[in-house]
Amino acid sequence: MNVTASKPPDQVRALRRRDQGREDNERVKNEAQAYANEVVPKRAARPARVVEDAKAHAPAWCEARVKRSASSPVGEYEKAPAVTSERLYLETARTC
């Protein structure tokens, strides 16, 4: 008995290709979601970690200087903007 190779009809092959395409689409979506679940939390935590590292390595006097400059009155700048700008620049350059 001889068995010859048979080919499925074109409609069957088209359905198989369609199903394979859907499976490939789902697989790629799942891979992308898995990658995002792994990478996004790490990336989101990085800026906070950098800030914390910088705070840990900054000298205490620099933090005090920043607090003082943030709470300095705006009136001094309004009275003499050039002098105040120059003073702040020189203080910053000297200390940090």
Image (cartoon, rainbow, N blue to C red):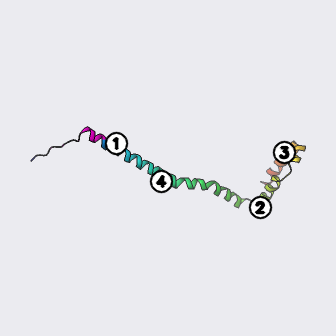
Q: Which residue is mark 3?
A: 85
Under tag 2, what secondary structure? helix
Q: Give the mark, 4 or 2, whose residue is nearer the N terminus.
A: 4
Q: Is residue 22 left or right of residue 90?
A: left
Residue type beneath disc 2: Ala
Numbered range of the magenta stretch = 3-14
Badge nearest the viewer, 3 or 1: 1
Indicate the secondary structure of the residue bearing disc 1. helix
Inter-mark Cα distance, 3 to 1: 69 Å
Task: Determine whether label 3 and label 2 are within 8 Å by CB.
Answer: no
Q: Which residue is mark 4?
A: 34
Nearer the observer, 95 or 64: 64
Q: Tell me the quarter of the picture where residue 95 sits.
A: bottom right
Q: Residue visible at 34% across and 45% down?
A: 19
The amino acid type, in three-letter code, at marker 3 is Ser
Q: Secondary structure at mark 4?
A: helix
C-alpha distance separating marks 3 and 2 = 24 Å
User: At which x and y percent is residue 75?
Assistant: 88, 47
What residue would you read off at disc 1? Answer: 18
N-terminal label among 1 and 2: 1
Marks 3 and 1, the one that precedes in the sequence = 1
Q: Closer to the observer: label 4 or label 1? A: 1
Mark 1 Cα-neighbour bin, 10 Å: few <14, some 14–19, many ≥20 = few
Callout 2: few (<14), some (14-19), or many (20+) C-alpha neighbours within 10 Å? few
Question: Which quadrant holds the C terminus?
Answer: bottom right
